Image (tube, grey):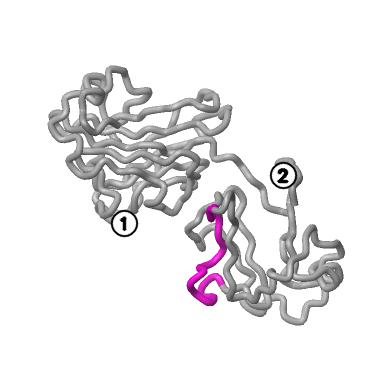
């Protein structure tokens, strides 16, 4: 319905109200005959007609995410994504709630209203494999989506050549950041300055990336955003001698979604001496 909601609110949509009340001891917030789901049915969340979050695979009946006669619940701080990620969920197991008369009396309790959301604060917004001597500048751009009291909770990893994650290789210094701030991490400063006309915010020798290398963003040691696939060298997301940039309003995810990005194309920045003079501007 047309109404407002405050941050931290939970809402339930049930197929009916009587058995919901009997099982949970409270009424559902909304009732819909369309919510006639079994444990092998997927759920999509839409915003302005676009899918912004999903549980399961709409093209598959069940699978590893099957919650028949049981439940599935989202991990704290995991973020919405139009691409389902099983790693973001805990399942009770099939038949785990079988024969239970009420949630509170069940050996496998559905953890209703327990999810805790933490704003990721930082997201990866861009990556460049530059055209100057030595393939420079090599850099990553990040953006603060919210005020951040301490940047040192965040780190970045540079996964080279499809060899899997290298973990955290750069940790931000302990300082605050305001929403709307951008940050660049460059492999070095001289060629970055020559190409962009400004100094990078941070320099890290670990940022020795080529266009087939993936980037991971960590918060408190957990991956919260990623560019590319850490187990694949390049592919459709290859930005060699070019760049890739995130679409406005797309959300961070530990599962890479190519649909959230615009690529320059391989070699699009080749032979450019400066970003502003390049036919393909980062």
Does residue 17 sit above or below 119 in this rendering?
below
The residue at 51%/23% (across/down) is 175
Drawn side of residue 124 relative to residue 10, left or right: left
Does residue 161 sit above or below 39 in this rendering?
above
Q: Which one is closest to the eye, mark 2 or mark 1?
A: 2
Residue at the disc numbered 2: 8
Q: Nearer the viewer, residue 15 or 38?
A: 15
Q: Residue 162's spot in the image, x, y percent?
A: 27, 54
The tag earlier along the polypeptide, 2 or 1, is: 2
The residue at 36%/36% (across/down) is 126
The residue at 21%/28% (across/down) is 278
Tell me which secondary structure the magenta stretch mostly adopts. Answer: loop
Q: Is residue 28 magenta?
A: no
Element type at mark 1: loop
Q: Residue 211's spot in the image, x, y percent?
A: 24, 43
Question: What residue span does the magenta drawing correspond to?
Answer: 50-65
Q: Is residue 60 magenta?
A: yes
Question: Disc number at residue 231?
Answer: 1
Q: Are marks 2 and 1 in contact (CB under 8 Å)?
A: no
Mark count? 2
Q: Residue 108's spot in the image, x, y percent?
A: 71, 70
Locate residue 26: give its quadrant: bottom right
Q: Nearer the viewer, residue 120 or 237?
A: 237
Element type at mark 2: loop
């Amino acid at each position: 319905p047309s109404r407002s909601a405050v941050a931290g609110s939970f809402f339930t949509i049930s197929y009916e109200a009587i058995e919901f009340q009997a099982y949970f001891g409270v009424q559902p917030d909304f009732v819909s005959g369309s919510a006639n789901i079994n444990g092998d049915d997927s759920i999509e969340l839409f915003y302005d007609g676009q899918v912004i979050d999903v549980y399961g695979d709409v093209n598959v009946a069940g699978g590893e995410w099957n919650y028949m006669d049981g439940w599935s619940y989202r991990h704290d701080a995991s973020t919405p994504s139009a691409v389902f990620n099983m790693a973001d969920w805990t399942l009770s197991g099939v038949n785990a709630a079988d024969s239970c008369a009420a949630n509170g009396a069940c050996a496998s309790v559905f953890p209703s209203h327990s999810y805790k959301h933490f704003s990721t604060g930082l997201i990866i917004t861009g990556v460049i494999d530059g055209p100057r001597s030595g393939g420079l500048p090599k850099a990553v751009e990040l953006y603060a989506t919210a005020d951040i009291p301490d940047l040192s909770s965040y780190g970045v990893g540079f996964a080279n050549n499809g060899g899997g994650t290298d973990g955290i290789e750069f940790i931000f210094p302990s300082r605050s950041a305001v929403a709307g701030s951008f940050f660049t991490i460059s492999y070095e400063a001289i060629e970055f300055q020559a190409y962009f006309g400004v100094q990078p915010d941070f320099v890290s020798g670990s940022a020795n990336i080529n266009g087939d290398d993936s980037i991971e963003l960590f918060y408190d040691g957990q991956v919260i955003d990623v560019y590319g696939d850490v187990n694949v060298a390049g592919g459709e997301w290859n930005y060699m001698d070019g760049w890739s940039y995130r679409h406005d309003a797309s959300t961070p995810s530990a599962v890479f979604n190519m649909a959230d990005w615009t690529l320059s194309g391989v070699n699009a920045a080749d032979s450019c001496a400066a970003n502003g003079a390049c036919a393909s501007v980062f």
